[in-house]
Amino acid sequence: MASNSRRAFLKVSMAAGAAAGLAAACTSAAQTPAAPPASQPAIAPPATTAAAEPQSAPVNVVQAPPPVATPVPTDKRTLVVLQLSGGNDGLNAVVPYGNGLYYQLRPQIGIAAEQVLHLNDQVGLHPNLKSFKALFDKHQLAIVQGVGYPNASRSHFRSMEIWHTAKPTGVTNQGWLGAFMSEVYKVGDSPFECVNFGSSVPQALLTQHAPVAAMQDTANFSFLVDRRLPPMKDPLLKTFGQVFAKPAQKSPALDLVASGWDTTKRGVDVLTGISDKYQPATQYPNNPFGKTMQQVSQMLTADVGTRVFYVQLGGFDTHANEKVAHAALMTQLADTLAAFQADLEGHGRADQVLTMAFSEFGRRVKENGSQGTDHGAAGPMFVVGNNVKGGLYGDNPNLKNLDEGDLAYTVDFRSVYATVIEDWLGAPSKDVLGGNFDRLGFMA
């Protein structure tokens, strides 16, 4: 990649008129962040190492016919990654209601079989995931069961680091999405190709080779100088108005902005007006997560060229009184993603967007003494979109063969990543993940 594609950006803060200011944080990322029905045989995919040759995908698939979607060029496709922070209890999200051991191990917090939204005669969804069931029935939701990695860590920090870097061993500063962006980013591309909604850039997005935006909302953004640059007298531009006209190339700070200024200014102009032009095609839940996903749709509708969005929903560390708290989270998760999907369809954007949700680990199989669950290992992932082959993928939870009290993983999370990278984003997954991993077949 050309060296000038690895430029960093200067911090720019903008007040976008009397009604709203425009603030985001774009940073060059050279920084370190904090069983199916009994009639079907189950064959679990073996764990895959980074150097392994490709292997066959899991046989245990309950899959619906794919929806009809308009083909979209790979460079026009967007991936929305949703992090369920804290460790989502997968057994109470995708419930093995057909397995009596589930109720023996969870006498207080288990979801009653008559309340479960049945997907087959063994597993079903939490009763508050009605919107997910509707997406599943429309073949727009793929559920990948038993996702994890070898020698699972029960530490939030370490496990999240593994998911963010796709490296269960060793240490690296570059995230897996950052590695993807370094493959596709070119000078002159939109500075908003990779966007995180939050106050900082998650490790998954870190790279030295492409700009990454951290937005609090679509009303604000800023660009930060790459810390590798030599010290500057005044590296931070206090207001966007200082450089609203194309800057003279006399200071190092302005030189950095000027190298991609025309593209940056076009992106700014688009962002400034999107709140006036956008009207949601459906009503979003009235909570912060709903607001965030509505703003993602806003940016997609404005077509500012974003390839990757990263968003988070927290609160999943349910050590005590889990049943009520987790039920509320299930409602937020399903209703918001269903509203997001409906909004995209209303604006003609649904064929170009794929949403993938993960959590750093699942919870222990046996409930604790506080009517909650402690840190576990494997759990489900959710993939939503018009181009998804909706259905169940991977083995149903095996509650007899546990890994130190936790579900043993049967699908390596990097296989999910590889499927998304190859079959949705159209990039070579080996270059991004550093190895070959099974592709799971949940993409149309």
Image (tube, rainbow, N blue to C red):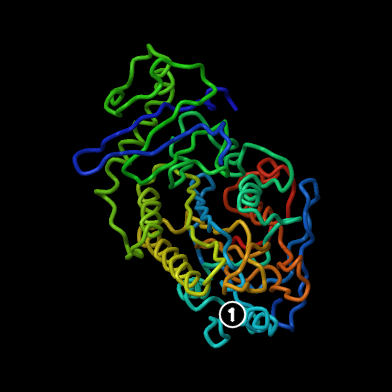
Q: Quadrant of the N terminus?
A: top right
Left or right of 406: which side holds 207?
left
- Which residue is most to the bottom? 114
Q: Judge by depth and name the residue closer to the eye, 284 or 170.
A: 170
Quarter assignment of residue 63: bottom right
Residue 200 percent coordinates (x, y): 47, 41
Q: What residue do we see at 50% from left, 41% from top?
A: 201
Residue 276 percent coordinates (x, y): 24, 48
- Which residue is most to the front? 369
Left or right of 36: which side holds 110?
left
- Which residue is most to the left? 18
Quarter assignment of residue 150: bottom right
Q: Quadrant of the C terminus?
A: bottom right
Q: Residues within 10 Å of mark 1 (few under 14, many from 20)?
A: many
- Which residue is most to the top? 250
Q: In this view, does 233 lie above or below 283?
A: above
Q: What residue do we see at 72% from left, 42% from top?
A: 434
The amino acid sitting under disc 1 is Gly
Q: Is residue 77 above or below residue 365?
A: above
Q: What residue do we see at 29% from left, 26% from top?
A: 244
Quarter assignment of residue 190: top left
Q: Mark 1 points at which residue?
A: 110
Residue 5 percent coordinates (x, y): 53, 27
Q: How many labels does the image show?
A: 1
Residue 271 percent coordinates (x, y): 32, 41
Secondary structure at numbered mark 1: loop
